[in-house]
Every structure is written in structure tokens, then in C-alpha cells.
């Protein structure tokens, strides 16, 4: 039976463009391996989601919505990477004209999906840094601006991909890809550096920690792991042309965002803030105690690194009544006089 298209007819016009993307190891091969790795990490995130639902069934509503949105985006991203591989390797098998002149919709939509995965995941890290104190809130503001810019460039890239259906010109859009990834990395490194600094400053309890605990604390819970992969993706988009190797790291990065989010949430004490009741006494000390208790409860809910509290200054005022003191002094003088007369 004759094939549905003539392979030879598709070759002359596309061979020069297609040659730039050879060998396939650095393009379709790298993307396929990234899809496999992403599927494995997606399974890990499903396991972490199951643990989260078991450990924190009554977690804060915002956090539960955040987890649901991130997992929906991760599911969509995983399905789209699989569809892209199927289109390139099965539907368009040996049809070079279709491969070079018609990218699948799933590939076109990936940038905007990845950008929203970054944004929603980083909301948790932004909240953790925000709760560290007023001096860290500027970091949150600047990082969120970077994330908004990253969404803007990803939207432009997605729009261009749907309008210009020609993968041969993908390399001309590399600056959009690199800029979006660069802005995402800038936000990542700001949150990661801040959290790492605070964790290092409050190392109480980590001196005897196992290597796995140290890895979870410094690499996963601070966001350092997905920050490293994001940096590699950014470098590859800038340094390597006509390649999809960055797609491998980008896909893995997308899965690491969800896994980092769930790892941070699952490393909390189960129901840590349950049973905490603070009664207002009406005094200044009581109000300060309520403030500290609320701050501590929020830190436990969002798994904020515990910064050692600064020593409090307690003012002690000693007041005396002069009249009473003088009477006691006169009595003591009178006793001394009587003792001297008795001698």
C-alpha cells in the first residue's frame, strides 16, 4: 500500500533547513529523553500529592488551591510534551515538510504553561520570604516583577509560535526563549539566595542532620534544585543554536517546580498549628504574645525558616515610697540608740 505522502517530494525544499537540526540526538532525541524524565518526575509529584492530601486534609484554603492549580498545569504540560513527541515521531514520521513547516499546537502552547507553573509555584516561595520580615519584602517585590516579565515574554513567544507555523525559524525566536528563562531564573535565585541565607543563619537543629536532611533543607526546600536546572536551560538557549537540548532541562525544571512545592509543604509538622489557642489578656505583654503566636503559626503553615528571635529588653522599674522608707530608718536609729544605752 502506498504511503499517504511522497517522502521524496518533501525533501528538496526542506533539506537545507532540516540539515541545521541534525543530528537528531540534539533535537528530537533530547526532547524525547526530557519527556521520559519529566514523566518520571510527574509520577513522583503524584506520590507527593497523595502524601499531602493524607497529612494536611484541612490545610489553608489558599495553599490547597495553589497545589491544585500547580498539579493541573503540570498534568497539562506533561500531556503536551507527550503529544509533541507523538506528532514529531509518529504522525510526521519521514514527512520532513510537515515537521519543518507545521509545529504542533502542544509545542506552541508549552511556553505559557511553563510560565504559569513558575508563577504559581513561586507564590509559595514568595510568601515564605515575605514572612521572614520587612527587610526581605523588597526582594519579594522585585522577584515578582521578574515573574510578571517572564509571563509577558512567554505570552509573546506563544503568540508567535501560533502565528508563524514554521519550526525552521524557531532559532530566530531564541531571544524570546532565553529572555523568558532568564527572568524566571532571576526570580528563582532571589528567593533561593534569601532562603538559603536565613537557613544558614538559623542552623539550630541542623548540626546533627543527616546528608539527606541537609539536601532537603538546602537544595530542595530553598528551591536551589529547580534554580540550577533553570540556569542550565537559560545558558543552553543562549550558547547552543539549532538544538532542543534546552528542552530536556526545561521539561525537567517544570516537574521540579511542583516537586519542590510539595516537598516544602510535606516537610512541615502535620497539623502543626492545630490546637494553638491564644487568649487576649488586654495588656501590652498579652498583645505581644498574640502577635508572636500568630507569626509563629503563619511560619509553621508556610514552612518559613525559623529565625532566632532577638533578645527582648525588659525594663524593670523599682519605685519606693520615701515616707515609709524614712519611718523605717527612724525606727532603726531608735533601736540602735536603745541598744547603746543598754550597754
Image (spheres, grey):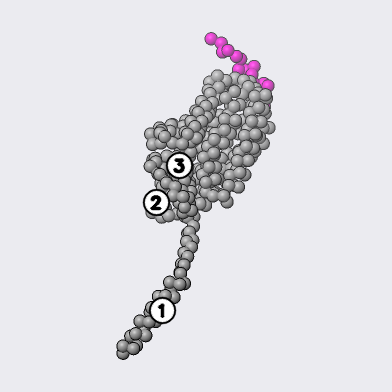
Point out the frontmost of discs 2 and 3.
3
**Residue 93 to residue 319: above or below:** above
- Where disc 2 sits, the SS reads loop
Residue 238 spot, x, y in % from top left: 64, 40
Regarding residue 91, the answer to whether it shows in the image is yes
Residue 50: name its quadrant: top left
Quadrant of image for the C terminus: bottom left
Residue at 43% x, 73% y is: 325
Which residue is nearer to you in this view: 212 or 90?
A: 212
Residue at 46% x, 67% y is: 318
Asked whether, in this view, residue 241 is left or right of residue 84, the answer is right
**Residue designated by label 1:** 330
The outermost residue toward the left is 342
Badge 1, how many Cα within 10 Å: few under 14, some, many 20+?
few
Residue at 52% x, 37% y is: 121
Q: Earlier in the sequence, mark 1 or mark 3?
A: 3
**Residue 160 to residue 230: above or below:** above
Q: Which mark is residue 209?
A: 2
Residue at 37% x, 85% y is: 337
Point out the frontmost of discs 1 and 3.
1
Amino acid at each position: 500500500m502506498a504511503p499517504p505522502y511522497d517522502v521524496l517530494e518533501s525533501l528538496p525544499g526542506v533539506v537545507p533547513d532540516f540539515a541545521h537540526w541534525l543530528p537528531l540526538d540534539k533535537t528530537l532525541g533530547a526532547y524525547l529523553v526530557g519527556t521520559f524524565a519529566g514523566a518520571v518526575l510527574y509520577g513522583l509529584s503524584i506520590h507527593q500529592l497523595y502524601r499531602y492530601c493524607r497529612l494536611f486534609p484541612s490545610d489553608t484554603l489558599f495553599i490547597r488551591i495553589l497545589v491544585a492549580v500547580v498539579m493541573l498545569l503540570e498534568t497539562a504540560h506533561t500531556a503536551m510534551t507527550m503529544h509533541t513527541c507523538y506528532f514529531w515521531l509518529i504522525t510526521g514520521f519521514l514527512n520532513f515538510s510537515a515537521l519543518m513547516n507545521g509545529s504542533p499546537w502542544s509545542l506552541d502552547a508549552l511556553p505559557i504553561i511553563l510560565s504559569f507553573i513558575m508563577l504559581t509555584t513561586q507564590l509559595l516561595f514568595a510568601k515564605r520570604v515575605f514572612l521572614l520580615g520587612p527587610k526581605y519584602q523588597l526582594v519579594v517585590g522585585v522577584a515578582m516583577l521578574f515573574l510578571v516579565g517572564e509571563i509577558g515574554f512567554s505570552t509573546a513567544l506563544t503568540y508567535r509560535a501560533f502565528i508563524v507555523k514554521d519550526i525552521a525559524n524557531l532559532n530566530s525566536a531564541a531571544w524570546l526563549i532565553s529572555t523568558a528563562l532568564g527572568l524566571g531564573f532571576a526570580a528563582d535565585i532571589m528567593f533561593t539566595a534569601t532562603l538559603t541565607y536565613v537557613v544558614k543563619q538559623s542552623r539550630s537543629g541542623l548540626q546533627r542532620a543527616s546528608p539527606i536532611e541537609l539536601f532537603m533543607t538546602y537544595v530542595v526546600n530553598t528551591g536551589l534544585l529547580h534554580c540550577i536546572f533553570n540556569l542550565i536551560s537559560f545558558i543552553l538557549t543562549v550558547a547552543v543554536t539549532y538544538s532542543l537540548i534546552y528542552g530536556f532541562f526545561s521539561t525537567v525544571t517544570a516537574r521540579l517546580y511542583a516537586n519542590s512545592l510539595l516537598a516544602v509543604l510535606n516537610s512541615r509538622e502535620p497539623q502543626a498549628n492545630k490546637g494553638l489557642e491564644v487568649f487576649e489578656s488586654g495588656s501590652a505583654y498579652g498583645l505581644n504574645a498574640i502577635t508572636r503566636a500568630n507569626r509563629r503559626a503563619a511560619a509553621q503553615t508556610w514552612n518559613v525558616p525559623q529565625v532566632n528571635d532577638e533578645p527582648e529588653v525588659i525594663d524593670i522599674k523599682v519605685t519606693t515610697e520615701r515616707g515609709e522608707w524614712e519611718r523605717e530608718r527612724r525606727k532603726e536609729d531608735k533601736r540602735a540608740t536603745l541598744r547603746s544605752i543598754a550597754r
